[in-house]
């Protein structure tokens, strides 16, 4: 299925979860969704390491990829991505979002100290929080507002302001089908572009029903630029040093 080998397993198990009751003041599609994936007791998630494989497009060329994302829930992340040819790494990317600022290290340069990139990285972090789903309930800065039976507005923090996604829920299954936002693509972008994280299927990891496959899509392009299939999820391990590391 994949043209590259996965990263070595980080850890086969997460520590036991502490839990709290599912909130009772959510819009109906949001309540239904979280009840489906978490039940009526939601796990407390402080960190996550998510690993998998897929494909990524750089400069119009699509490569097989393997990736590992490290999150301090709702605060920071490190992305490590390898674009591969014949199973061997060709391009390596280390992207950090720490203390509200992004640093993107790529073979052809470094991007940092760019406010629009910082704002985009913050949205990316919250978009990836579908793999840390209970943070979207336990973080006091998060707000859910009803739109209709199948949609809700998700408001997330950004420094002293906020940003937002439109969440779409499948009317047949009740599961989240996509998160959409307006997001800056480049440091010099004059306007935001529609951006979507689309869930393709679901699987249980560490006892939580999570997206197994997803597609990340700029909405002015015909196809997703990044597809991800999750193979390992580890929660609530110490990532304070690991989130600053290079590589996997």
Image (tube, rainbow, N blue to C red):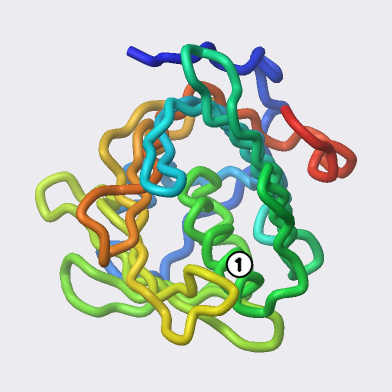
Residue under the image location 12 percent in, 55 percent down: 171
Residue under the image location 67 percent in, 79 percent down: 115
Does the image show residue 56?
yes
Residue under the image location 43 percent in, 26 percent down: 64
Q: Which of 116 and 12 is in front in this view?
A: 116
Q: Which type of secondary structure does the marked residue at label 1 adopt?
A: helix
Left or right of residue 59: residue 74: right
Left or right of residue 46: residue 128: left
Q: Which residue in the rendered view is the most extreme toward the left?
A: 172
| The N terminus lies in quadrant | top left
Residue under pointer 1 = 122
Number of marks drawn: 1
Q: In this view, does 72 lie above or below 122?
A: above
Q: Which of 244 and 220 is in front in this view?
A: 220
Q: In this view, does 12 lie above or below 65?
A: above
Q: Nearer the viewer, residue 195 or 129?
A: 195
Q: Which of 232 and 134 is in front in this view?
A: 232
């Amino acid at each position: 299925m994949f043209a590259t080998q996965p990263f070595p397993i980080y850890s086969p198990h997460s520590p036991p979860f502490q839990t709290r009751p599912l909130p009772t003041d959510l819009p109906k599609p949001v309540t239904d969704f979280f009840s489906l994936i978490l039940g009526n007791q939601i796990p407390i998630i402080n960190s996550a390491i998510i690993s998998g494989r897929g494909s990524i497009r750089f400069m119009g060329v699509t490569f097989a990829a393997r990736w590992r994302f490290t999150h301090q829930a709702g605060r920071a992340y490190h992305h490590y991505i390898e674009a591969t040819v014949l199973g061997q790494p060709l391009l390596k990317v280390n992207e950090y979002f720490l203390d509200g600022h992004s640093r993107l290290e790529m073979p052809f340069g470094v991007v940092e100290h760019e406010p629009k990139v910082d704002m985009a990285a913050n949205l990316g972090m919250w978009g990836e929080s579908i793999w840390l789903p209970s943070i979207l309930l336990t973080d006091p800065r998060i707000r859910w507002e009803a739109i209709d039976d199948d949609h809700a507005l998700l408001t997330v923090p950004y420094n002293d302001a906020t940003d937002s996604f439109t969440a779409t829920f499948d009317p047949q299954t009740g599961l989240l089908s996509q998160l959409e936002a307006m997001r800056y693509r480049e440091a010099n972008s004059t306007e935001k572009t529609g951006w979507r994280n689309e869930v393709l299927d679901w699987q249980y990891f560490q006892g939580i029903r999570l997206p197994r496959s997803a597609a990340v899509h700029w909405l002015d392009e015909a196809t997703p630029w990044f597809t991800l299939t999750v193979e390992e999820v580890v929660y609530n391990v110490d990532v304070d040093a690991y989130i600053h590391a290079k590589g996997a």
